[in-house]
Image: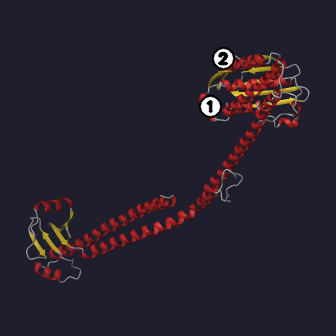
C-alpha cells in the first residue's frame, strides 16, 4: 500500500469515526426528544381528561367519552384509564374491554408519581392526579406514528449522508495526499537519477522550511559527504598505488640490471641488501596503509578497552629505538596522581602507532635525532606532547600536513610516505580526541595529542 493510499485510509477512518459518532449522538438525542415530546402529549391528554371528569361537576363519564372521542388532538390508538384510590376504574376511553391493570403498577405509580414503559410500538405513561380530596392514577397509552416516522426518516438521511460523506472524504483525502506527497515523488525521481559516477548533482531544495525541505537538505549533505569520501578514496588509491609502485619499480630494476650479466658475490650481496631495504620500506608502507584502513572504520570502537598511556609511550619508544638505534627519545611524566590519570579507553595497537609516528617524525627531522615526550594527566584528558628542535614547518605546509601522502617542502631528503601524520590524526579522532600542532621555523615543532580519560 502506498503512502498516499495509507494516508487517505487513515484520514477516512478518522473522519468516519467523527461523523459516525456525531450522527449516532444526533439520532439518540432525537430519539430521546421524540420520546419526551410524546410523553408530554400523553400527560396533557390524561391530565385534561382527569380535570374534566373530577373537577368539573357538569361533566360525567358519558359526556367525557363524547368529548374525548371527538377531540382533534387525540393520539393514534389512544386509551385513557383513570383509577380512584380504591384501584377502581372510573373512566375508560378506547377499546371495548379495558385491559387489566396490575395492582402492583398502581402502587408503584403512587409511590413514584410517574412510570413510563414501551411495549413494542405502544407506549404507556402512568402518573398520579391529585384532587382536593383524593389521589387518582391516570394511565395513557398510544402510538407515536408521526414521531417515529420522523425519527426513521432522520436515520435514513443520516445513514445516506454518512455514506456520501465517506466517499467524498476518501476522494478529497487521496487528492490532498497526492498533492502533499508530490514533492516526495519528485525527490525520489531526482535521487534515482543520481549515480555513483556523478555525485556532484544535488537535489532541488524549495524555499519552504518544512520537513520535505529539511529532508532534501539532509540528502544534499549526505551526497556532499559521499562525494568527499569517494574523492578521498580515489586520491588514496592513486597515491597508495604511486607510493607502492616506487619501491616495486626499484626492486624490479635492480634485479633486471643484476641479471644482465654474471656478477661477483659481493655485487650480488650489495643488490640483495638494497632489495631487502626496499622490501622493508614496502612492508612498512603496507602496514601503515592497513592501520589507516583500520582507523577509518567505526567497527574498531567495539574493541576498545582501558589502556595506560604511559605504557603505550614506553612501548612506542622501545619500538623506535629498536628500529633506529641512532635515535633518542626523552620521556617525562607530569601532573599524575594515580593510575586513573593515565587511563584512556581505546585500542592499544592504534594508540601505539599514533605515538610511534609522532616520535619517529620528531627524531627524523631533528638535527640531533631526539624527540621530547611529555605526558600529563591532569584534568579530564590525557595530554601527550611530542616536540623536537628541527627546522619547523612553514605556514604554507601547516594546513596540509595531515592530508594523506602529503609531504612538506623541506622533507624531500628524508625517507617517508606522508602517511604517518594523517594516520595519527585519524586515530586520535577515532578515540574522540584530537591533535594540535605548533611550529616555529628554525626552532622546532610541537604536536599535542588530547585523549579523553577512561570513564
Judged from this view, the residue extending furthest toward the front is: 262
- Depth check, front residue: 422 or 67: 422
Q: Please give left or right for residue 157 compared with residue 109 in the image.
A: right
Mark 1 neighbour class, 10 Å CA radius: few under 14, some 14 to 19, many 20 or more: some
- Distance, label 2 to label 1, CA atoms, is 23 Å
One can see residue 424 in this view: yes
**Residue drawn at 62 percent across, 23 percent down:** 306
- The residue singled out by tag 2 in the image is 339
One can see residue 380 in this view: no
Q: Quarter-wise, where is residue 113 in the image?
A: bottom left
In the image, residue 104 lies at what x, y percent?
12, 59
Q: Quarter-wise, where is residue 411 in the image?
A: top right
Q: Nearer the viewer, mark 2 or mark 1?
A: 1
Q: Which colour scheme appears in the figure? A: secondary structure
**Residue drawn at 50 percent across, 65 percent down:** 174
Q: Is residue 218 above or below residue 139?
A: above
Question: For the residue labelled by badge 2, is the local secondary structure a helix, a strand or a loop?
Answer: helix
In the image, residue 297 lies at what x, y percent?
64, 35
- The residue singled out by tag 1 in the image is 301
Amino acid at each position: 500500500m502506498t503512502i498516499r493510499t495509507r494516508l487517505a485510509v487513515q484520514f477516512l477512518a478518522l473522519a468516519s469515526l467523527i461523523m459516525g459518532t456525531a450522527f449516532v449522538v444526533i439520532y439518540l438525542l432525537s430519539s430521546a426528544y421524540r420520546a419526551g415530546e410524546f410523553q408530554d402529549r400523553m400527560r396533557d391528554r390524561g391530565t385534561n381528561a382527569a380535570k374534566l371528569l373530577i373537577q368539573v361537576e357538569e361533566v360525567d363519564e358519558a359526556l367525557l367519552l363524547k368529548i374525548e372521542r371527538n377531540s382533534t388532538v387525540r393520539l393514534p390508538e389512544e386509551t385513557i384509564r383513570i383509577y380512584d384510590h380504591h384501584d377502581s376504574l372510573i373512566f375508560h376511553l378506547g377499546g371495548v374491554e379495558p385491559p387489566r391493570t396490575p395492582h402492583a403498577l398502581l402502587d408503584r405509580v403512587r409511590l413514584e408519581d410517574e412510570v413510563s414503559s414501551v411495549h413494542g410500538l405502544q407506549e404507556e405513561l402512568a402518573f398520579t392526579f391529585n384532587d382536593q380530596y383524593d389521589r387518582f392514577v391516570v394511565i395513557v397509552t398510544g402510538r407515536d406514528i408521526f414521531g417515529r416516522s420522523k425519527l426513521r426518516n432522520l436515520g435514513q438521511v443520516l445513514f445516506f449522508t454518512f455514506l456520501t460523506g465517506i466517499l467524498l472524504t476518501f476522494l478529497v483525502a487521496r487528492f490532498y495526499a497526492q498533492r502533499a506527497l508530490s514533492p516526495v515523488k519528485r525527490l525520489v525521481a531526482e535521487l534515482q537519477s543520481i549515480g555513483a559516477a556523478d555525485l556532484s548533482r544535488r537535489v532541488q531544495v524549495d524555499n519552504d522550511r518544512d520537513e520535505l525541505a529539511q529532508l532534501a537538505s539532509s540528502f544534499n549533505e549526505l551526497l556532499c559527504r559521499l562525494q568527499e569520501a569517494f574523492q578521498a578514496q580515489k586520491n588514496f588509491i592513486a597515491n597508495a598505488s604511486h607510493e607502492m609502485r616506487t619501491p616495486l619499480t626499484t626492486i624490479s630494476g635492480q634485479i633486471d640490471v643484476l641479471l644482465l650479466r654474471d656478477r661477483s658475490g659481493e655485487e650480488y650481496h650489495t643488490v640483495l641488501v638494497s632489495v631487502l631495504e626496499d622490501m622493508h620500506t614496502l612492508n612498512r608502507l603496507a602496514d601503515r596503509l592497513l592501520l589507516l584502513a583500520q582507523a577509518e572504520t567505526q567497527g574498531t570502537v567495539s574493541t576498545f578497552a582501558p589502556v595506560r598511556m604511559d605504557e603505550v609511550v614506553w612501548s612506542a619508544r622501545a619500538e623506535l629505538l629498536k628500529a633506529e638505534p641512532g635515535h633518542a627519545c626523552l620521556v617525562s611524566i607530569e601532573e599524575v596522581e594515580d593510575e586513573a590519570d593515565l587511563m584512556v579507553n581505546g585500542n592499544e595497537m592504534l594508540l601505539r602507532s599514533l605515538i610511534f609516528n609522532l616520535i619517529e617524525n620528531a627524531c627524523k627531522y631533528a638535527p640531533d635525532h631526539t624527540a621530547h615526550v611529555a605526558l600529563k594527566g591532569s584534568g579530564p584528558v590525557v595530554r601527550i606532547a611530542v616536540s623536537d628542535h628541527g627546522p619547523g614547518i612553514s605556514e604554507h605546509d601547516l594546513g596540509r600536513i595531515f592530508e594523506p601522502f602529503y609531504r612538506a617542502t623541506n622533507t624531500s631528503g628524508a625517507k617517508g610516505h606522508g602517511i604517518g601524520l594523517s594516520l595519527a590524526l585519524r586515530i586520535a579522532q577515532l578515540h574522540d580526541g584530537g591533535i594540535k600542532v605548533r611550529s616555529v621555523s628554525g626552532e622546532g615543532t610541537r604536536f599535542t595529542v588530547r585523549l579523553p580519560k577512561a570513564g
